[in-house]
């Protein structure tokens, strides 16, 4: 039987007098029990001290660092792992980044938790963990796992806050947190993050910043200007998004209409109005709002076309819906929401073979997409 938690795979033992690490200079305090990773072949209560290996102790320490943050001997365990494996920080970081790129989320999370346990006060580790959680949330949201996505977004927010509280300040924490808040439509927080980033980097010359640093400063200023010019840090706009996204659409629509009275050319506001209307199945009103969003500058945003296409499908205008979805696809060809909607549209048009191709394509991008998997199973069962 597999252990219920990672810590259940660890023994705590007193090191025998005759046991030595391969690193002779390593100082062992034999009064403190050391965690030991069980072998897969160990039967319950059948631990053989004579077969103990240094690797089991190091693995046990890494597990404790990742999952037992209140252990009274953490500092001692950190000192052992750093002495025994001087390059462990780099190894763990590279492995965590690789697993994140491969979307091996569980193992990547374990690696980031281990790094956090090993280097609890390192703001770079905290920021990298926030970025990982942010990416995991995005992936889950693409897969239709909205509750899981919200949970990881909440965790990411906590890590971003911790990274921004570091002393001395870490400029990149504010830059990356700014984009996180942009995705949350919390434009006031995003603006504040980008303003702080600029303040922290204002005295650094371009040569020291390098090409990437110069780009970041320009991008931060551009976003600040856009938020300011469109008044998107307005309280009514913030309230509207929070209300609509939490299922209080009617109250949210009141807020966004209030905002639009004074800001009629802000495409994001029209998009938000359309989104709220669409969630209430007011297809015609939502369609008009999305068309207004396109005319006010939202024509470079794939989500605007995607949302409009949903309304067109529900209103029975399938040909126009397809044209609109293809525009969205041109802007964002790897967006699985758009590809899924092309699949739904093909179904509505009676083209099961084409629908299967689209849903198959979604699963090639994201094997965990439960909606595409379900639709594909239905189509295959009906053949």
Image: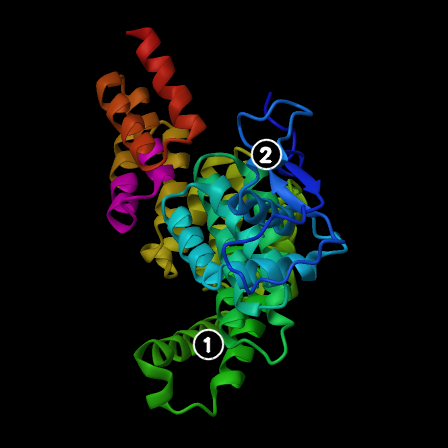
In the depicted structure, whether residue 186 falls above or below residue 100:
below
Q: Where is residue 129 in the image (x, y as percent from the top left)?
A: 53, 57
| Residue 35 relative to residue 136: left or right | right
**CA separation, marks 2 and 1?**
56 Å
Prevailing secondary structure class for the magenta stretch in the rendered image: helix
Task: Verify whether residue 250 appears in magenta.
Answer: no
Q: Do the residues labelled 2 and 1 touch (CB within 8 Å)?
A: no
Q: Which colour scheme is used?
A: rainbow
Q: What stretch is highlighted in magenta?
A: 324-340
Q: Name the residue under label 1.
A: 225
How many other residues sit within 10 Å of disc 2, few (<14), some (14-19) or many (≥20)? some
Q: What element carries label 2?
A: loop
Quadrant containing the N terminus in the rendered view: top right
Q: Where is residue 331 in the image (x, y as percent from the top left)?
A: 27, 51
Task: Return the residue nearer the eye: 108 or 186.
Answer: 108
| Whether residue 237 can be seen here | no
Q: Name the residue under label 2.
A: 38
């Amino acid at each position: 039987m597999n252990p219920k938690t990672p810590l259940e795979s660890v023994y705590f033992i007193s090191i025998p007098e005759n046991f030595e690490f391969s690193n002779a200079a390593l100082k062992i305090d034999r009064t403190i029990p050391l965690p030991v990773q069980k072998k897969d072949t160990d039967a319950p209560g059948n631990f053989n001290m004579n077969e103990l290996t240094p690797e089991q102790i190091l693995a046990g320490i890494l597990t404790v660092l990742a999952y037992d943050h209140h252990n009274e001997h953490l500092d001692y365990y950190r000192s052992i792992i750093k002495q025994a494996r001087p390059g462990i920080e780099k190894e763990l970081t590279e492995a965590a980044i690789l697993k994140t790129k491969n979307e091996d989320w569980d193992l990547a999370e374990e690696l980031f938790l281990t790094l956090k346990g090993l280097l609890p006060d390192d703001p770079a580790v905290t920021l990298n963990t926030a970025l990982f959680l942010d990416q995991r949330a995005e992936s889950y949201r693409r897969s239709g796992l909205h509750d899981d996505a919200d949970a990881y977004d909440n965790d990411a927010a906590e890590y971003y806050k911790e990274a921004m509280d570091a002393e001395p300040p870490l400029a990149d924490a504010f830059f990356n947190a700014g984009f996180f808040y942009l995705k949350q439509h919390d434009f006031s927080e995003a603006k504040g993050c980008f303003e702080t980033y600029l303040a922290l980097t204002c005295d650094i010359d371009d040569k020291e910043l390098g090409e990437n640093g110069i780009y970041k400063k320009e991008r931060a200023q551009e976003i600040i200007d856009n938020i300011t010019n469109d008044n998107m840090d307005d309280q009514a706009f913030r309230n509207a998004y929070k209300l609509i996204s939490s299922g209080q659409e009617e109250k949210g629509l009141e807020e966004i209409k209030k905002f639009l009275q004074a800001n009629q050319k802000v495409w994001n506001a029209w998009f938000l109005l359309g989104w709220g209307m669409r969630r209430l199945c007011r297809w015609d009103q939502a369609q008009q709002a999305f068309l207004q969003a396109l005319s006010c500058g939202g024509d470079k945003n794939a989500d605007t076309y995607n949302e409009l296409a949903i309304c067109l499908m529900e209103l029975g205008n399938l040909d126009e819906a397809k044209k609109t979805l293809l525009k969205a696809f041109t802007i964002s060809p790897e967006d699985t929401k758009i590809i899924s909607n092309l699949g739904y549209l093909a179904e509505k048009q009676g083209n099961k073979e084409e629908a299967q191709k689209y849903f198959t394509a979604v699963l090639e991008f994201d094997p965990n997409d439960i909606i595409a998997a379900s639709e594909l199973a239905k189509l295959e069962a009906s053949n």
